[in-house]
Image (tube, helix red, strand yellow):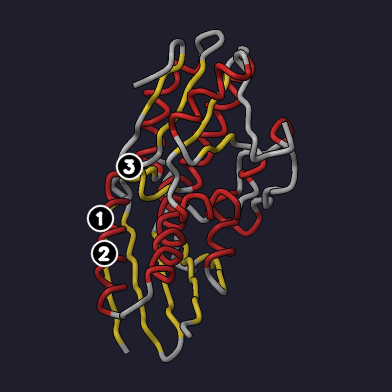
């Protein structure tokens, strides 16, 4: 089992660093380009959620990211120590509605669920949140 | 080279939440100008997040409100796939060819013409 970890502060400037981290881990884990694209986007959306919702745009919050390559699956855990939030309560966008009626919110969660096989949000007892995403690897 | 009356913007790199905010700062003065016709050449964009998609939608709505339009071009297959996944391929005006994306404004006399979509 391979484990990759990164800790960053809750600054949108760190999203590029998170992307490089996922890219390097994906190379070590020999993910396909498509698998990397999916995991990278899901992680980017999840970290953006944490920065915007758990830390409300504050730049000094702690975010830890763990990628675990288990047999036949990849597990991503994103832990923050900010305000509790439950993204699963965000209404999913109606992707069939026309432009005029199109709601702009909820797309981040939509992509996380679409690109990964399982997405779970947990509020941690000591404060903060855990976003856990799993992708099956064939 | 751009057609008369058409502004072409060519963002580069990542349209993550940060890149999207920077792009909006650049687009806002343009799209809020009456009748703005804008082409976004996405050839150099290798990643777009939900925030990036939102900025494109906001820009399109702003231009259309004032009688202009927004055409997208030069999208990679992955960008096109992400846009379709969100159902936004029926909303955005997308052209593989950037010259065509500009010409569409002339042909349509101001409104965006999208021959790949039946929904307007």
**Of A18 and A77, the residue lying toward us:** A18
Residue denoted by label 3: B44
Q: Position of residue A135 (x, y in %)?
A: 49, 76
Disc 1, disc 2: CB below 8 Å?
A: yes
**Of B41 and A122, the residue lying toward us:** B41
Mark 2, Cα crowd under 10 Å, few <14 / some 14-19 / many 20+, is some
- Indicate which label's residue lies in the foreground, 3 or 1: 3
Residue denoted by label 2: A21
Q: Position of residue B22 (x, y in %)?
A: 35, 31
Label placed on residue A43: none
Q: Position of residue B115 (x, y in %)?
A: 65, 35
Inter-mark Cα distance, 3 to 1: 19 Å
Label 1: element kind: helix
Disc 3, disc 1: CB below 8 Å?
A: no
Label 3: element kind: loop
Letter of the chain that mark 2 sits on in the rendering = A
Q: Quadrant of residue A29?
A: bottom left
**Left or right placement of residue A89 versus residue B20 in this view:** right
Q: What residue do we see at 41% from left, 63% from top? A: A37
């Amino acid at each position: 089992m391979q484990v990759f970890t990164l800790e960053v502060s809750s600054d949108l400037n760190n999203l590029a660093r998170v992307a490089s981290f996922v890219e390097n881990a994906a190379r070590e884990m020999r993910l396909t380009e498509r698998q990397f694209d999916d995991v990278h986007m899901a992680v980017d959306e999840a970290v953006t959620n944490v920065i915007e919702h758990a830390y409300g745009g504050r730049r000094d919050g702690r975010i830890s990211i763990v990628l675990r390559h288990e047999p036949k699956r990849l597990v991503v855990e994103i832990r923050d120590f900010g305000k509790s939030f439950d993204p699963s309560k965000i209404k999913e966008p109606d992707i069939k509605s026309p432009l005029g009626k199109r709601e702009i919110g909820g797309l981040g969660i939509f992509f996380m669920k679409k690109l990964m096989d399982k997405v779970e949000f947990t509020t941690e007892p000591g404060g903060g949140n855990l976003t856990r995403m799993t992708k099956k690897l064939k | 080279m751009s057609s008369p009356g058409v502004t072409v913007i060519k963002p580069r790199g990542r349209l993550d939440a940060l890149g999207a905010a920077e792009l909006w700062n650049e687009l806002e003065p343009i799209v809020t100008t009456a009748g703005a016709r804008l082409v976004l050449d996405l050839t150099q964009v290798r990643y777009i997040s939900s925030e990036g998609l939102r900025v494109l939608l906001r820009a399109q709505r702003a231009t259309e409100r004032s009688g202009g339009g927004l055409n997208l071009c030069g999208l990679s297959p992955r960008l096109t796939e992400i846009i379709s996944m969100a159902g936004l391929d029926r909303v955005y005006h997308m052209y593989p060819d950037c010259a065509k994306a500009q010409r569409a404004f002339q042909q349509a006399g101001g409104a965006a013409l999208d021959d790949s979509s039946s929904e307007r």
